[in-house]
Amino acid sequence: MAATSVIVLDRSNNTTCTINLHGATVVSWRVNNQEQLFVSKLAVFDGKKAIRGGIPFVFPQFGPWSFGPNHGFARIVRWTLERGPERLPNGDVEAVLSLMDTDFTRSMWNYPFRITYRIILREKELHFHIGVYNPSKELAFSFNLLLHTYLKVPDVRKCQITGLHGCTFIDKTRDGAIYQEGREVATINEWTDRIYQHTSQEHIITNVVSGRKMRLQKYNFPDTVIWNPWLDKARETPDFGDDEYPNMVCVEAGHVSSPVLLLPGTAFEASQILQVIVNPKR
Ligand SMILES: O=P(O)(O)OC[C@H]1O[C@@H](O)[C@H](O)[C@@H](O)[C@@H]1O
């Protein structure tokens, strides 16, 4: 049996989305044949390691964790395909994945849970709807959730990111010191690892593939993590090529600087929409 397996959402016109059931990782999103996501040439697809690139699903922990692997277990376990991929009456294509607790997840985090992850491929958009349910009758639990989106870019130094102005951020490159973003648009010219708090519901990222803009919209995700390892950290990361850092930027919508507390019998929902902005003059 293959270590990992994929499903493909095909909206025709060379617009596709490929999801690896390992971690429910979206590993490709092509719009008119143009790849929008970065996946490292050194990414490992062994059904064990997290896939370096695309959109890994971070749950129930963001960052290091004494009970389990960095960024939790959801990105390193096999998810179930619940439905699809199927074409909707309007031509969009949908797939629904799910994840439940197992002995493996319980060995790190001893709670019952159910996650539903619905992905819809539209003409120029990719929609993500997440539901986390606590089926317990008496136990509450708390968790982090984040979509670790790796955008493909020709040169990260030319990208600008809106929606961060005035926000406080935890700077992981400076021992977690807290600062406030003073720039109208953020740019990246060095190792960057920041958890921006209470960010705008919308970010525009300029100069993604073909010099276009990408819109990221988010609901119930108060934080935005911006990450680029730059050269030194890239060298320390075995599944990331030394020369690849200029070609990616992670813009990660999440609920991470404070946990979500989920009471018994209740659900938490969050969404993200990625949209390629097409300039009619081009
Ligand atoms: O190497 P990993 O576990 O995939 O993490 C990559 C990066 O993910 C980011 O989200 C974190 O803010 C960084 O601190 C981390 O280095």
Image (cartoon, rainbow, N blue to C red):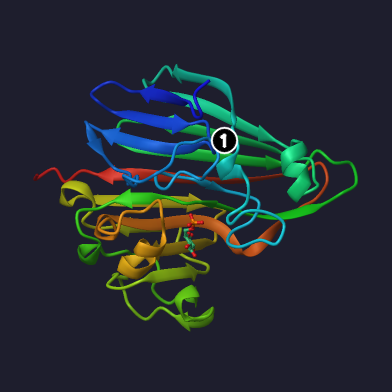
Q: Is mark 1 within 8 Å of ligand 1?
A: no
- Residue sticking out furthest to the right: 138
Q: Position of residue 89 (x, y in %)?
A: 42, 17
Q: Amino acid at mark 1?
A: Tyr
Q: Is residue 178 visible?
A: yes
Residue to which mark 1 is pinned: 117
> Residue 173 or 258: which is nearer the viewer?
173
Residue 125, given in percent of the width and then of the height, sits at 35, 38
Quadrant occupied by the C terminus: top left
Q: Residue at x 67, y 42 (%)?
A: 132
Relative side of 12 to 128, left or right:
left
* In the displayed structure image, the side of residue 169 where residue 116 appears, left or right: right
Spot occupied by residue 178 in the image (x, y as percentages of width and height): 52, 81
Left or right: where 254 falls relative to 280: right
Q: Could you tell me which secondary element the residue under label 1 belongs to?
A: strand
Q: Can residue 92 be seen by looking at this rendering?
A: no
Callout 1 crowding tier (Cα within 10 Å): few <14, some 14–19, many ≥20: many
Question: Residue 163: x, y in percent?
Answer: 38, 65
